[in-house]
Amino acid sequence: MKSEFNQSIISFKIIINPLERKEGMHTKHPRVKINKNRLFLRYGQVILSGLILINLFACKKDAITKPQLINIKAGLLNSINALRAKGCHCSIDTITPVKQVSWNDSLEKAAAAHAMDMYNKNYFEHISPQGITPGDWAKQQGYNAVSLGEDIAQNYETIDATITAWKASHEHCTVMMDSVYREVGAARYGNYWVMLLGRR
C-alpha cells in the first residue's frame, strides 16, 4: 500500500516444519617555491596542502550521520496486545480476540538487523538482495522458529500510524492477529519498521 507520502508496507509469513529447521577535468599545477617552510603560489595565492585537503574530505564524510535505532518496545507491545485482546476486522475477516504476545529480545535484534540492512542497502523487501529471509535473521539471533511472521513498513512517523497501516491491509492484519504466535520483537531504523512474531 502506498500513500501520497510514498509510505509502504509488506507482509511475510512462513510455517517451518519443526523437524526441518533450516533455514573529465584536467588541472594545471602552478609553480611553487619554498620559503621558510611556508608554501606560496606565485602572485601571492595561497594553496592547501594535501594533508589539509584530506582532512577536509574526512570532515565532510563524518558530517553524514546515520540514524539511531529507536526504542519502540513498550509502545508497540502495548499496541499489538491491545489489538489482539480486542479482536479486529481484517478486511473481510473478523478475527476474535486472541492470546497476547510477550516481548522477545532475540526477535527484536533480528528485526533491527533487517531494518538496518534495508536502510544501508536501500531496498524494501522481506528477502535481502543476498537472499537472507526473516527466518534467517531470527536464526542468526538464536531464535529457532516453528512459525514466524513479519510485517515491514516504510516512511511512517509513529507506532500508531504504522499499526493502523498494517491493520488496514488484510495480510498484515492477519499476521498481527494470528493466534499461533506467542512472542514479538520489533525495531525501527531510520524510516524502516520491522516487526517479527514467532513461536518456538
Image: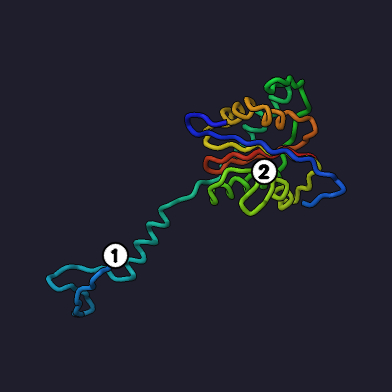
Where, by quadrant of the figure, is residue 125 drawn?
top right
Could you tell me which residue is drawn at 20 percent across and 77 percent down? 32
Which amino acid type is shown beneath numbered disc 1? Answer: Met
Type of amino acid under label 2 = Glu
Q: Secondary structure at mark 1?
A: loop
According to the picture, the residue beneath numbered tag 2 turns out to be: 108
- The extreme right residue here reads 19
Q: How is the image coloured?
A: rainbow
- Relative height, residue 41 to residue 7 (above, below): below
Rendered location of residue 120, percent (x, y):
54, 51
The extreme front residue here reads 24
N-terminal-most mark, 1 or 2: 1
| Left or right, residue 56 beside residue 73 | left
Q: CA distance from mark 1 to mark 2?
A: 49 Å
Label 2: which secondary element: helix
Give the residue at mark 1.
25
The spot of residue 191 in percent (x, y) is 53, 40
Q: Quadrant of the C terminus?
A: top right
Label 2: few (<14), some or many (≥20) within 10 Å?
many
160 with respect to 32 (left or right) = right
Q: Are marks 1 and 2 in contact (CB under 8 Å)?
A: no
Which residue is nearer to you in this view: 125 or 166? Answer: 125
Residue at image point 53% right, 33% down: 7
Q: Quadrant where the N terminus lies?
A: top right
Residue 122 at x, y percent in the picture: 53, 48
Numbered mark located on residue 188 in the image: none
